[in-house]
Image (cartoon, rainbow, N blue to C red):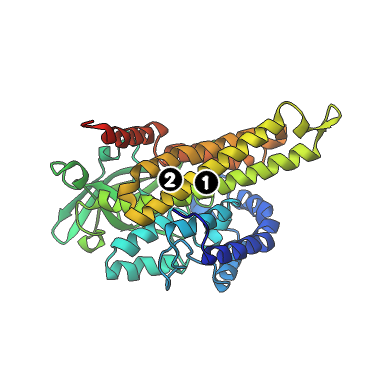
Amino acid sequence: MDFQPSAKTLEYRKRLIQFIKENIEPIESNYHKECRRLNPDANWRNWEVPPIVAELKAKARAAGLWNLFLPDAELGAGLTTLEYAPLAEVMGHSLLAPEVFNCNAPDTGNMEVLYHFGSAAQKQEWLTPLLNGEIRSVFCMTEPDVASSDATNMQTSIIADGDDVVISGRKWWSTGLGHPDARFAIVMGLTDPDAAKHQRHSMVLVPLTTPGVTIERMLPAFGEYDAPYGHGEVVFDQVRVPKANVIGDLGDGFKIAQGRLGPGRIHHCMRALGAAEKALQLFMKRGQDRIAFGKPLLQLGGNLERVADMRIAIDQARLLTFFAAWKIDQVGAMKALAEISAIKVVAPNVLQQVVDEAIQLYGGSGVSHDVPLTQLFAVARALRIADGPDAVHRATIAKVELAKYRGR
C-alpha cells in the first residue's frame, strides 16, 4: 500500500491551504462573533447566516475548490477516498472551511447517498441544488426513546400506503435542522419488523415543509446551540410523501447507510486530525509566548513530553485513517468495517486529548471564546457519540478479530 499523496491531491492541498490562509483565517474569529450576535438563543426560526459565508462560497467555487469529496470528475474533483483524506484534514484546521468548500456534514453524506442510490428524479430535485450550494439538508436517524448504539432499535415507521409512504416517529440530534437553508431530510425508519434484521428499514426524502413535520426544538451541546446549523428534535406525525421519495427500495436502509457512513467517517476523522493539528499549533504558540516562573510554559511541567506524545498520537491516527481509506478504495466499506471502527475510536479521542492539553495550557482563556478550543473540544466529545459509542466500535473490531481464529 502506498499512502503518498497523488499529484492531484498535492495540487488541491496547496490551493486549499492558500485559500484558507488568505480568505478564511483573517475573518473566522469575527465570523463566530457575528454568528453569536445574529443568533443569540435557541429560537432557530430567526437564525441567520453571516453574509460573508455566501461571498466565500462563491469565491471558492470560482476557484474550483468545490465538492472535492465527491468521486466524480464532472460533479466533484474525481478523487478516491484516500486522495481526498489529506484535503479533509486541511479543512479541519477551520470550523468554517468545510462549508465554504461545500464539503460539510451532513450534506456530504446526503449527497453521496443521492449520487450512489438516488433515482434520476431525486438527483434532479435534491442532489443538483445541494451540489450547487443552493440549499442544505438534514439526516434523521437517532431517536430519543431507543438505544441508538444499536441502530436496528429505531422505531420511526415508514409504511407503504398505495402510491405513498407514511412516516411516523420522533428523531433528535438531527444536525443542520435549524439552518435557514435546510429544505429536506433523509429519514431512516422501520418498514417491516418481520424481515431480516438489516432489511427492515428504509430511507426516504422528506421536504421539511410537508404537513405533519414539526421541528420542536434545537438541542444545546455543552450549552451551545451551534447556530446557524443546530441539532434538532423533530416529530413526523403521519407524514405522507410519494413512494418515489424512497431511496432505493423499501428495506434498503441499512445497505444505503453503510455506503453513506464509510467514506463519511474518513471525512470526519481527517477533519478531526486537522483540528488536532490546529490545537497543537495553539499549544506551541502559547507555550512559547507565555512566561511563568522565569521560563516559557513549554519548559515547565512536562510540557515538552506532552508535545512529543501529541505528535505521536496525531501521526499514528493519520496513518490508521489512511489505511482505512485505502481499504475502502480497494475492497469497499463493508469489508473495511474493523478499520473504520478503529478510526472512529482513535481520531476523536486524539482530538479530545490534544484539545484538553491546549485548554489546560491556556488556562482561563482556554475555556472562553477568545480561542476556538471549547468548540473543538465539543466537536471531539460529540463525535465519540455521534459516530457511535467507542464500546460499539471496539465490539465490532473484536468480532472481526475473533472470526479470524474460529476453527483454529
For label 1, count other residues whose C-alpha is less than 10 Å away and answer few (under 14), some (14-19) or many (20+).
Answer: many
Residue 67 on image: x %, y %: 47, 65
Q: Secondary structure at mark 1?
A: helix
Q: What's the mark number on residue 232?
A: 2
Instruction: Reply above or below: 61 against 274.
Output: below
Q: Is residue 325 left or right of residue 402?
A: right
Say which label, 2 or 1, has the lower sequence index.
2
Residue 325 on image: x %, y %: 43, 52
Of residues 43 and 140, the one drawn nearer to the viewer in this rendering:
140
Of residues 357 and 338, the one drawn nearer to the viewer in this rendering:
338
- Residue 324 makes an appearance in the image: yes
Q: What's the mark number on residue 318?
A: 1
Q: What's the mark number on residue 195?
A: none
Q: Place residue 150 in its image quadrant.
A: top left
Q: Secondary structure at mark 2?
A: strand
User: Of the residues shown, which amino acid type is indicated by label 2?
Assistant: Gly
Q: Place residue 397 in its image quadrant.
A: top left
- Residue 184 makes an appearance in the image: no
Q: Residue at x 50, y 39 (%)?
A: 348
Q: Residue at x 44, y 42 (%)?
A: 343
Q: Place residue 190 in its image quadrant.
A: top left
